[in-house]
Amino acid sequence: MASAASAPPTPAKPGSLPRIVAASLIGTTIEWYDFFLYGSAAALVFNKLFFPDSDPLVGTLLSFLTYAVGFAARPLGALVFGHYGDRLGRKKLLVLSLLMMGGATFAIGLLPTHASVGAAAPVLLTTLRLIQGFALGGEWGGAVLLVSEHGDARRRGFWASWPQTGAPAGQLLATGVLSLLTAVLSDDAFGSWGWRIPFLLSGVLVIVGLWIRLSVDESPVFQQALAQAEARKAARAADPEAQAEKLPLVSVLRHHWRDVLVAMGARMAENISYYVITAFILVYATTSAGVSKQTALNAVLIASAVHFAVIPAWGALSDRIGRRPVYLLGAAGVGLWMFPFFSLIDTGGFGNLVLAVTVGLVLHGAMYAPQAAFFSEMFATRMRYSGASIGAQFASVAAGAPAPLIATALLEDYGSSTPIALYVIASAVLTLFAVGVAKETRHRDLAAVDASADAESTAARA
């Protein structure tokens, strides 16, 4: 039994990897569409629909506060989905996360506003946002692992970067739908009923995503690890003095706590810069630079298309020169770009606005592209879902969750972009340190990570 369990994982069938990548990408795109749609709506209409008694900027702050609540639920989703994903498999949990996210988003499209039900409206909105965050907390880890564990080490950075393009694809889809609606509808029509259309559209997208996601196979690396776990379970049954296998979370904190801290630090600049560039920009450009809502949306739309295109290129580069060099380039670049970023927006010109957001997202992609492979290669298979999800999602509470809120508050207090730029630069310094002290993981054999973890566990028991 031991020898069968330790056999190398069965390689993916010829032609199956692109199908697996497509399933992860489409599902991730739909989930990020749902998540980003809320962020855009929070910046554009939710302040008036759900917090009408506040002045415009305070209403925006309250709207972004409900936006941040979704991030608060992501660590809990990471813990729950990570635990069961490491025990039951990646595929089952990915189907569940897609259903939860799509259902919550569809329900937001049916919500009554403050004018209809009063204080109950923002309460219902916040509850559905919590469900969105919980689902997304489990989605990211499973999607990138399904691809990482099917592919080989030589091109893992490239293939694993494709689920990462789900973020700009979702942003592109959400911003595109909103941009189209604001272009064809009057402000009154959009504020009255037009904003509901993108949320209701999520129901159709989820059906498509489920059909594709249900067609893929479970990760062969996970299947091998599951067989090894069953062999150890049988061995423990024959030896009453053997120790029970620890929960994935316990194993992560015992064997991979340094990797969790590295992942959290690596996420700071990536997460904060992204939400400043894509969500807060809708507030800053319209209130401080005098840019119209439609113009700001169009700029993000164009930049998101470029972002989508460059992520696989950055992932492929990480296969050639390493995860760390590409990641460090992105962190340093985002920090250096912040002052030019706001200066270009302040001109009020559409071309400068597009340039500011596009360069920012291209530099962000240098962090985001290798992240999937980088985090996957840090953890052993039976704790990989938990480890990657915990490292990524716990950081989001301190990074992406408050980023638009902090940026809006700084703008209100100082009336200047300088404190906001310094805020992003500080996060870039933290990420440079975290990635700088990390080990390079390029070409690491995922099965070898398991062997290393088993050896450490054996040594600890000796």
Image (cartoon, grey):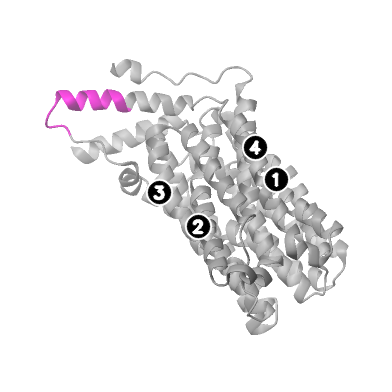
- Amino acid under label 1? Ala
Write down the region rendered in magenta: 229-242
The residue drawn where x is 74% and y is 43% is: 309
Q: CA distance from mark 4 to mark 3?
A: 24 Å
Between 159 and 196, the residue placed more toward the observer is 196
Nearest to N terminus: mark 3 or mark 2:
3
Q: Is residue 69 magenta?
A: no
The residue drawn where x is 61% and y is 70% is: 114
Nearest to N terminus: mark 1 or mark 2:
2
Q: CA distance from mark 4 to mark 2?
A: 22 Å
- Name the residue tied to disc 3: 79
Assess disc 1: are there few (<14), some (14-19) or many (≥20) residues with their C-alpha within 10 Å of its C-alpha. many
Nearest to N terminus: mark 1 or mark 3:
3
Nearest to N terminus: mark 4 or mark 2:
4
The residue drawn where x is 63% and y is 26% is: 19
Q: Residue furthest front?
A: 116
- Amino acid under label 4? Ile
Residue 233 image position (x, y, % from top left): 24, 27
Disc 4 and disc 2 in contact, CB within 8 angstroms:
no
Return the mark for residue 169: 1
SS for callout 1: helix
- Name the residue tied to disc 4: 26
Dominant secondary-structure state across the stretch colored magenta: helix
The residue drawn where x is 65% and y is 37% is: 26
Assess disc 4: are there few (<14), some (14-19) or many (≥20) residues with their C-alpha within 10 Å of its C-alpha. many
Between 301 and 119, the residue placed more toward the observer is 119
